Amino acid sequence: MKLHDWTRILLLMALVGVAGCRHPAESVKTDPLLKAFDTEVDWTDPLHVIPLNYQQAQGKRIFYQQCVWCHADATPAGPSNRSNLTPVPPLLNDGAVLNAESDENMSNIVTLGGAAMGKSAMMPPYGRMLSADEIRSVIAFTRAIAQPPFQPSARAGLQ
Amino acid sequence: MPAEEMGKLTDRTRLIFAASSVVFLAVLAISPFKDFRREWKQYKRSYQRFAQSRPDTKKLLADYRPDIDQIWLPGMNVVDRCTTCHQGITQASLGDKAVPEPFRAHPPIPHKVRDWGCTVCHRGQGPATEVAEAHESTLAWEQPILPTRFIQSSCGTCHYADLPQTPQLTRGRELLAELNCQGCHRLPGIERPAMLGPDLTNIGTKVSREWIYKWLKEPRTIVDKDGNVTVNGYETEEEPRMPKFRLTEAELRGLSAYLSVQKAKAMVPYKLDARVVTAWRKNPELVSQGELRFRQMFCSTCHSLAVTRAGETKLIGGDIGPELTKVGSKVNPEWLIAWLRDPEGYLPHTRMPRYGWSDEDLYKVTQYITTKLTDTDLLTSVPQMGSPTEQEIQLGRRLFLDKGCGSCHSIEGLNPQKDFGPDLSALGGKNASELDFGVAQIPRNLVSYIQAKLQDPASVNPAARMPQYNWNPSDLDAITTAVLSMKGAPATSALQNLVVTRKEVAFHPTGSFGEVYERYKCYTCHKFNGYGGNLAPDLTYEGSRAQRQWIVDFLKNPQTLRPTLILRMPQFNMSDKEAATLADYITMVLQHPAANPAAVDAKQFTPAMVALGKQLYEVKYQCQSCHTIGGAGGYVGPNLNNAGGWLTAAWTEAWLRNPQALIPDTIEPRRNFTEDEVKALTAYLMTLRQVIKPQKIASISGSRTLSQGSGR
């Protein structure tokens, strides 16, 4: 009975979602830098489009303003500053490195800067520029695009 | 009736009464049962069961009540019962994707659900208590839930000013302005663009009748070498602003006839210096030198050209002016020379600056344009039409008004019809029953209606006058979002108070600065007090930032400071007097109160401060991650090699304290420097000087691409 109800609700939700309009064409490759506001094309697989919720989409917007220059290999302006830096900053989707960091740790690195957290001083602090909400949204975006995917349960001390 | 018979009847009646009482009781018993089984009550109970299964049960059930939940905001006309089923909407611990709907928490947004309700953003029926009625449109309820990909339209219903959080809505509004939709439709809050379609009063002096015919039939049609037609450019997403009208052969002939005789103001041909022409005419370098000048003047900052590399054709360059790949086959060469010398003489509202040309440059560049930027096949598909007849001209004149051409293009002496298209200022709030779906085979809802009208107006109304646009999917959604946001005047005064209005500012100073400013159209790319383009740096406080001498040198010979930029400031060949006028005004007027150049005396900096500053720059703060000094450093911020010759000390100090206070959009983060560190860093930066030789940018060879060229 319970299962049946859930199926019905999920089906309804899906119906509401598509009511009267087409789904974002998943086969159409959109320009990840400019045009797709609530999706992000997986950096490792151009055919995989990742849907973003409001918070993640805000994170995407801030990422492409502030972070993309050093944490991606392609930027809206073309060349990336990443290869200029030693140590080389991690790509934002690098799950192997970033999945291990807790949300709190990530937030501290962004807020206080690399030097304060025992990392490279090349990472500036953003705590006086971005709000706590904005920093949280960037982390949410990081989690959304991580490859290998981010598993919240794998994180220590979730509860 | 005898009494004994009455007794018999009474027995029968009793039986009937007894039976009906039983039925009545049964019915009475069913209704509580039915009530118990109501949809929302089932969700209520299953939420209770779900909460029991979570570790924080107590918190999840803190405000649980077994009856209908309602958010009632009388001032906003909100009666939302959505939280009856969506009970976990404000519970932060239920944000995870594993939590089943309808109990999942709302993703974090700037507004609180309890203060705003749900239907304000999501639409749907707030008071409904059944899933289907709340979410979809039924006979009684007409407003379905807004698909989330258009959700930003709800932000735009109150926020008339652009928000950084709603890029899709902003893009949609930009498209509405750029494509001049308000030429025909009433659209609230959309400004008319600085340049509508070109004024056609003298179009006959610019192009031939054949070219007009071709353009009207297929704006920017490209035929590749195999003869395949690619409409709308080069399969890029660059749209010509001119849409496609569905015109018949007779209409094409009429309009092209009418337009080709528009020569109200005779063009005055400019006679190039005969010595220049003789000296260059036979020179084999003429065209390649013209191309070089074309590149050096950075025409490509505003105009694009199609470039084929490795089998792929792409438009390279800016989109402020028209694409120029085939302009040599379009315009009359005499007109071209006259236009380049004085664009406003032909088009008073143009955004094209008036360059300072030497006859030599003018000859070389126009020769390059008329010999290289051509397509000999461009007009081959146009039939021979001969000179226009009076009948054709009259037909064209009538069509010009009937087709709505006058809404975007003006012709002197011709008054266009007011409110040519329907008023769209409240379309975004309409119910399905208010829409005329015509012959369209689409789902009966507002989103489908808007998208069908945008994609193919004739699919809804075969007699539609609206022309045909060619959208890519994301622009289609963006413009749909912008149209959906227009729900008309707020229904209540409480809502009226919530509206965030858009500031309308214009910056058109008078005096000698104003003249030069209008001549070079500084506002096309730069912003002044919130007015102007986004392509180049905001100059609102440029007078506090840059030293006067640097401004003069830069205007005379623009150098790129930010290597990641692809487009750059054109070489205007400005006179010394003009550069001085601009620099004087900028340094006197465009000032920030927090950075008064006179307030900081660079003489106070000691060598010890310089040494400390250098150390802070290189070791403690590692500014080289983004900025370049000498040969090394990052590409993100501007090159600081000449910081001492460029920036004022006062600006540098104020900037180091708080960059966003000076330029809100800047990406340099605000640091936590001590006052001593600010002084030391400023002292160090002020020592950095690099003399830029007044060489022309001729070092950029002709074969280099734009992006490589600006990487120097």
Image: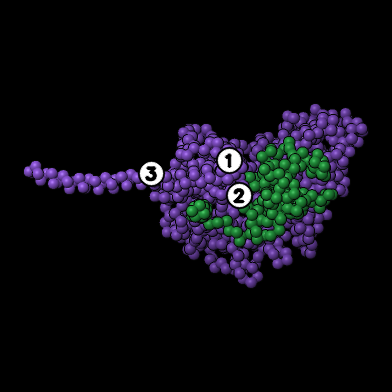
The C terminus of chain A, quarter of image: top right
What residue did someone put label 2 on?
Answer: B97
Q: Which residue is mark 1?
A: B57
B376 lies above or below B446: below
Q: Amino acid at mark 2?
A: Lys
Q: Is residue B600 above or below residue A150?
A: above
Q: Is residue B398 left or right of residue B636?
A: left
Q: Position of residue A94 (x, y in %)?
A: 74, 53
Would residue B386 be seen by someone viewing this image from the given angle?
A: yes
Q: Quadrant of residue B278?
A: bottom right
Number of other residues with Cα within 10 Å of mark 1, as a class: few under 14, some 14 to 19, many 20 or more? some
How many marks are shown on the rendered structure? Answer: 3
Q: Is residue B69 above or below residue B221?
A: above
Provide the secondary structure element on which disc 1 rests: helix
Q: Chain A drawn in what color?
A: green
Q: Which chain is purple?
A: B
